[in-house]
Amino acid sequence: MSQTLEPNQFLKVRGANEHNLKNVDIDIPKNKLIVMTGVSGSGKSSLAFDTIYAEGQRRYVESLSAYARQFLQMMQKPDVESIEGLSPAISIEQKSTNKNPRSTVGTVTEIYDYMRLLWARVGIPYSPATGLPIESQTVSQMVDKVFNKKDNTKIYLLAPIVRGRKGEYRKEFIELRKKGFQRLRINNEFYDIEDLPTLDRYKKHDIEVVVDRLVIKKSSEQEDKDLLQRLADSIEICLQLSEGLLYTLEAESDKKEVYSSNFSCPESGFTIDEIEPRIFSFNNPAGACDKCDGLGNAVAFDLKLIVPDENVTFRDGAIAPWAVNTSKLYIQTLQSLGKHYKFDIDDKFSDISEDVKQKLLYGSGDEKIEIVYNDGTRVFRTNKAFEGIIPNLTRRLKESESKWVKEELGRFQSDKDCEKCNGKRLKPETLAIKINKKDIAEVSKLTIEEARNWFLSLNKVLNKQELEISKQVLKEINDRLGFLTSVGLSYLSISRNSGTLSGGESQRIRLASQIGSGLSGVLYVLDEPSIGLHQRDNERLLSTLQKLRDLGNTVIVVEHDEEAILIADHVIDIGPTAGINGGKIIAQGTPQEIKSNKDSITGNYLAGLKSIPIPKKRRKINPNKHIIIRGASGNNLQNIDVEFPLGILTCVTGVSGGGKSTLVIQTLQKSLSKILNGNSAMPAPYKSINGISQIDKIIDIDQSPIGRTPRSNPATYTGAFNHIRDWFAGLPEAKARGYLPGRFSFNVKGGRCEACQGDGVIKIEMHFLPDVYVQCDQCKGKRYNRETLEVKWKEFSISDVLDMTVSEGAELFKAVPLINEKLETLERVGLGYIKIGQRSTTLSGGEAQRIKLAKELSRKGTGRTIYILDEPTTGLHFHDIKKLLEVMQELVDNGNTMIVIEHNLDVIKTADHVIDLGPEGGDKGGYVVAKGTPEEVAKVKESHTGTFLKKLLENEK
């Protein structure tokens, strides 16, 4: 009797020991939404990404041929005994999609590819000169245009048979010879058909047949009639040879004109060769603007950077590029210019007339000016036109070979829209093709929500035939726009550069693409998809994850968001704490089962046994202490005035795309950094900023890495390693050997192991397999040579200290205040589990941010510092957020100001002051919707943040 075997319903992991995992055995239900949670550093990512996904990806790549494998990044085999029931795995992590300036939201999601197809098939070309629709030209129209050229104009009538295509074209040449043609124009050079060059088959060529050569000369009626007939015959031959195209080339001026029996404006003669999807691509020479090569912008000297403040005098540095140079040359040049144009170098730039400003900046033209130079011993006089500040800088940049000079002058440049295409990236003839009065670039600039409405409106605009042609393309576009809306990205524009997206936005774009692909039977592994998302958009994201599961996929999400945990089919809580004290499965089951598990920290927070308390008393705002920005209008900010109180904790909130980052990072932080620190980065536009005298420092504590190389680590960044090296150099054994602190550095020769140059590992390239890092057999991974390792403190060498966790190191150096203080501060921000010498490249963004916070905590502050944090709760568990808030509140207690961009309600409820931006994202945002204490904001009905805050505050009363 045959027995029906049940399909394997579980993903079975046995003996997982990757990173800090402790021999984990677990059965994970398939085709469910699984949330892995636990405190930061507990081992969630080690299990989800470095074990399950890594093995799934490795097995897939291993199944391919050796040839295919060399093109794919292959992951190392994770430290796991076995994994059964593994499906093909796709990872969607928090990485920026692409830093390439040619990559946009539209190209990443393929929306722009479908738009190119749509414009190519149903777009109507218009003449830029007349605004009239472009129609095909008749032979008669072409004959009349050529005939009406100036008398005695020598012209060639050319038939373009090859345009920008690769090949040798031998057969075509033989056919043309048989037809009796005598001359060809190949790549702008004329050749006799009997003496043609051999073409490089791998290069692109332009080939035109010379159909006729003639001189336009009006004389007798009969001769004119003969010339018209000759023109008509030759043009017809051209159109037959080149499928409706004709080039005329004037022999003397090389002026070329294009005629088309397909698309051409009958009045201006504006012609489009052919309408194909490639001419709408800014990554293809056929469509890209030839001035900016399809980038839409160009680097140019910026007047705002050259003269940053018009109220500064010339002597005090009104001309910034000349102010940084101490040479007398510039002052003497200005004195001579002042004498000629009747101004003094103690005048402000704003005091001189617009005409003189233009001459100073762009040159005096033909007007000669006497400029006197005195080097202390001799006097030199020149009498010539003044070059102009901006032309002078442009020339110096072009002529200089010095990297330093180029970097220095580059400080006064910025990206500006291309003058030819106005930032639209495409050629004028491409932008002349429109659907419903809009070109493809105009629609690309719309937000996802606006574009969705526009594309839906086409059903009423296009005729029956156009709708039939575009039916499938419109469906693909609308589906993709719908998926992006469902993951909370309706505020992004299609043309948004993907390099400017946050990690969370990039991840949600990839998530939307996966839903669009409609795959089933796949294992998806996601890393905190809720990052950067307002509570209002969170519900849509969670329903998207459920939709992905309902397609027949297993969805594993590493997440701390309470709502995500509560809607999961299965929750896996990893802990109990972090680092070496984590890596165990503490609890698993339904959300309800996790809540009732007393050993689970996550369960305790979900059940309300543990919580982040609301402060009993909020700090009062001092009406005389604040920074006021007026007229902030960057991106979508609506010319707003915003007051940031000093000496308190302020949360800037609002829906995604509401303008938070533009206000806090692009405007406040960049303007203060420019004024206080002399940074060259240009802030977003604003009218004025007041109250700066009350602060002396602004520090942006972001999630960027603390170092770019594996040699950087928490000890080197916080300065603890300098004290550790000094301590080891001061030990009796080190003194006896004459060792200085440099001996204990792994970055310089002397004490380090030279076999691995202080890395502890040696890289071996495997070509078809991933690079393998093997332990150095000389130092056994300890980084130092044998003599250096013989110097010990309490039986520990410097290598042993680097391999300790921060908590172990703090205990070891309890009696050494300089070292202990630094390490204890790292412990206080919840990083006791990381190793003192852990490579910075292995730290998460959240860990890097907290290391920066710890560095600030260990400094002796002035109490006049503004700290800016952008979503500091990223990657943090409830328990870690509680610790983080304690540190943030301590910095504010010391008199400092903390401004935090945040969506997390646990942080918002502890703030002294909330500034809520909105009401929506994109063009519908950029206003201050509410401000005040959390309780005051909760009362504002128009505030989406207030709505969710109200529920939370009521529940916690």
Image (tube, rainbow, N blue to C red):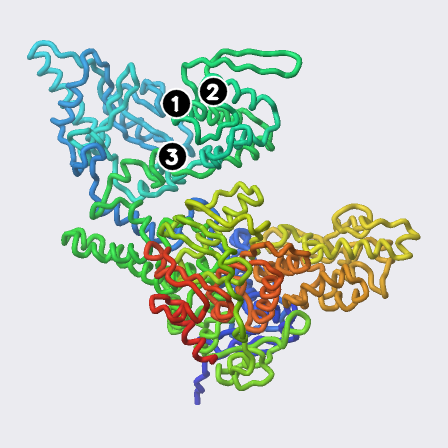
Q: Which residue is mark 1?
A: 197
Residues packed near mark 2 inside 10 Å, few (<14), some (14 to 19) or many (20 plus): some
Q: Which mark is residue 166?
A: 3
Q: Residue at x 71, y 65 (%)?
A: 824
Residue 442 horizontal/vertical position (percent) = 29, 46
SS at badge 3: strand
Q: Marks 3 and 1: which is nearer the front?
A: 3
Lower position in the chain sequence, tag 2 or tag 3: 3
Looking at the image, do the residues carrying marks 2 and 3 touch, with CB atoms under 8 Å apart? no
Q: CA distance from mark 3 to mark 1?
A: 15 Å
User: Under tag 1, what secondary structure?
Assistant: loop
For residue 560, above or below residue 252: below
| Mark 2 lies on residue | 387
Residue 315 screen position, x and y as percent: 55, 28
**Residue 86: x %, y % from top left:** 51, 71
Indicate the quadrant containing the N terminus: top left, top right, bottom left or bottom right.
bottom left
Of labels 3 and 1, earlier in sequence is 3
The front one of 198 and 544 is 544
First in sequence: mark 1 vs mark 2: 1
Q: Nearer the viewer, mark 2 or mark 3?
A: 2
Residues marked 1 and 2 touching at CB (< 8 Å): no
Are there few (<14), some (14-19), or many (20+) residues within 10 Å of tag 1?
few
Front residue of this view, candidates 529 and 327: 327
- Determine the residue positioned at 43% across, 85% down: 4
Asked if residue 92 can be seen in this view, the reply is no
Q: Residues within 10 Å of mark 3 (few under 14, many from 20)?
A: some
Viewer can see residue 640: yes
Residue 254 vs residue 327: left or right?
left
